[in-house]
């Protein structure tokens, strides 16, 4: 039985929600909203376009980067226990982690990592796309090879590996896995008994499948239940449990008259730590018309209608999510969807207007305004194409010079082979980035991935550009994964 007395949403708002979900071809979604002591929870659509099984209150969705807030909550709980401090150097708890700057390696704190103020670039399988059997330990070892975009503590740069490292610190201090700790200290006290994460999420009886847009239709993705990115992603929450999570934050650490986390400790996670500069702003980081956007500890901080808004977006293979909370107004909303689209962000702001009893705005137009900063990292944008252009016709002899073994410090080994007259890229530790290379210019190719969800996740088809000297191919660049060097050079005819 649900512990919440649910209220119905205004039929006009409900119809508007349906229109947005239909516009973006969202197969299934759930909306969970809190307004003081009132609760709204409604599932929409299906959890799978194959089975057509309907989404329910207990259907768990991959909440992607909304998971980061659970890392900061875990740290806050351990702060309450006196077992660590936000300003502990990460090295004290995870001594094997290193960064490209020895001073940063020694001094970077849990606060620095959860606040995304390392200045490091998002690059490599360290950040996304590793196979499920890749260990967190191996990815942490690659952190030392991530280049910097800015000096330490001078600029917001969003990262997954930072939160994964903090989750590792939680494990070392707690003496159990990160998932076991948040299950005991957060999920169970909040009555969140139908949510989980990583490999254990495969045991949930009711889980939504992710979907990707391909050829104008939704194709179902295979759910990847992996512990690799736990801490940064990979938690699965259902709508009913989302109500508890929202209420917990609205009540600043209290739930059902029980103190789960000290209010001051939870407020710390909601506090701005890093101002997000104009060039780094993106619609998923806060309300588009907010005069300032910052990043807290696992949360983005902005304003909405004169109130402080804490929110976070999530995007992973076949899924998008948004959690938005205005603590001083006692309202919050979580929206989980099983495809990749701006629908959760649009609907979050629509719902906040409704909960605050404000006049409705055209949030679809606002969120998708092409003049807003791109949601893609600036360094990726020049290397992604909306569509695959017409291929040049090249004989096998012209492609053979690219064949060989390659290696990148942040992504591991790769190979290029000729198969059926096509150049094939195999990224050994990633199923997402393997596929055929389509020639479109001199030493210039576009990746047609085997996994058709990749263009949805990245926002386009990756360009693959080869580096050469006068006699040999020396390597190639692929966005997100970085520069690969050939380990055995091939002569250019």
Image (tube, rainbow, N blue to C red):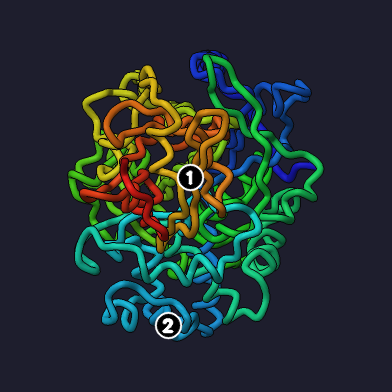
Q: Please state if 89 lies on the left or on the right of 225 as rendered.
A: left
Number of other residues with Cα within 10 Å of mark 2, as a class: few under 14, some 14 to 19, many 20 or more = some
Q: Nearer the viewer, residue 96 or 255?
A: 96
The residue lying at 54 percent from left, 68 percent from top is 138
Q: Nearer the viewer, residue 340 or 386?
A: 386
Q: Earlier in the sequence, mark 1 or mark 2?
A: 2
Q: Nearer the viewer, residue 261 or 73?
A: 73
The residue lying at 31 percent from left, 81 percent from top is 107
Specify the label residue 80 is tagged with. Answer: none
Give the labeled residue for mark 2.
91
Horizontal and vertical percent position of residue 332: 49, 41
Q: Is residue 235 above or below residue 50?
A: below
Give the labeled residue for mark 1.
416
Residue 333 appears in the picture as rendered? no
Q: Is residue 64 above or below residue 370?
A: below
Residue 103 appears in the picture as rendered? yes
- Could you give the CA–CA distance between mark 1 and mark 2, rounded to whole angstroms? 38 Å
Closer mark to the observer between disc 1 and disc 2 = 1
Horizontal and vertical percent position of residue 484: 37, 54
Q: Please state if 149 lies on the left or on the right of 109 as rendered.
A: left
The quadrant where residue 172 appears = bottom right
Number of marks drawn: 2
Horizontal and vertical percent position of residue 337: 57, 32
The quadrant where residue 346 appears = top left
Number of other residues with Cα within 10 Å of mark 1, as a class: few under 14, some 14 to 19, many 20 or more = many
Determine whether the residue tagged by mark 1 lies in a helix, strand or loop: strand
């Amino acid at each position: 039985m649900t512990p919440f007395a649910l209220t119905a949403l205004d039929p006009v708002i409900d119809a508007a929600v349906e229109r947005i979900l239909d516009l973006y071809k969202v197969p299934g979604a759930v909306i969970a909203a809190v307004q003081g002591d009132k609760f709204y929870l409604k599932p929409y659509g299906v959890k799978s376009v194959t089975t057509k099984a309907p989404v329910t209150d207990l259907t768990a969705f991959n909440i992607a980067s909304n998971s980061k807030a659970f890392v900061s909550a875990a740290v806050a709980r351990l702060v309450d226990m006196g077992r660590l401090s936000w300003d502990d150097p990460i090295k004290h708890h995870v001594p094997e982690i290193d960064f490209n700057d020895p001073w940063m390696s020694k001094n970077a704190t849990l606060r620095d990592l959860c606040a995304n103020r390392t200045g490091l670039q998002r690059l490599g399988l360290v950040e996304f796309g590793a196979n499920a059997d890749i260990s967190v330990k191996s990815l942490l070892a690659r952190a030392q090879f991530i280049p910097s975009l800015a000096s330490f503590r001078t600029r917001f740069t969003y990262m997954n590996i930072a939160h994964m490292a903090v989750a590792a610190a939680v494990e070392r201090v707690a003496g159990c896995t990160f998932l076991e700790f948040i299950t005991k200290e957060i999920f169970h006290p909040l009555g969140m008994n139908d949510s989980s994460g990583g490999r254990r999420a495969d045991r949930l009886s009711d889980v939504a499948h992710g979907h990707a847009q391909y050829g104008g239709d939704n194709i179902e993705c295979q759910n990847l239940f992996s512990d690799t990115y736990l801490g940064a992603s990979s938690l699965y929450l259902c709508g009913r449990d989302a109500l508890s999570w929202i209420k917990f934050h609205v009540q600043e650490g209290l739930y059902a008259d029980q103190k789960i986390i000290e209010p001051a400790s939870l407020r710390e996670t909601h506090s701005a730590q890093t101002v997000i500069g104009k060039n780094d702003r993106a619609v998923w980081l806060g309300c588009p018309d907010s005069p300032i956007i910052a990043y807290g500890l696992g949360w983005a901080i902005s304003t909405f209608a004169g109130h402080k808004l804490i929110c976070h977006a999530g995007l992973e293979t076949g899924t998008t999510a948004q959690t938005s909370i205005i603590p001083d107004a006692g309202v919050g909303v979580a929206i989980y969807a099983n495809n990749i689209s701006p629908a959760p962000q649009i609907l979050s702001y629509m719902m906040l207007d409704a909960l605050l009893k404000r006049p409705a705005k055209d949030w679809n137009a606002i969120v998708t305004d092409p003049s807003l900063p791109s949601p893609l990292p600036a360094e990726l944008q020049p290397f992604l194409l909306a569509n695959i252009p017409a291929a040049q016709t090249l004989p096998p002899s012209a492609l053979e010079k690219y064949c060989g073994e390659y290696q990148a410090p942040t992504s591991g080994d790769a190979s290029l082979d000729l198969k059926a007259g096509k150049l094939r890229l195999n990224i050994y530790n990633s199923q997402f980035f393997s596929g055929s290379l389509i020639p479109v210019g001199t030493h210039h190719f576009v990746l047609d991935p085997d996994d058709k969800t990749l263009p949805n996740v990245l926002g386009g088809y990756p360009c693959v550009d080869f580096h050469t000297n006068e006699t040999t191919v020396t390597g190639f660049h692929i966005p997100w994964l970085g520069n690969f060097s050939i380990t055995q050079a091939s002569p250019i005819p």
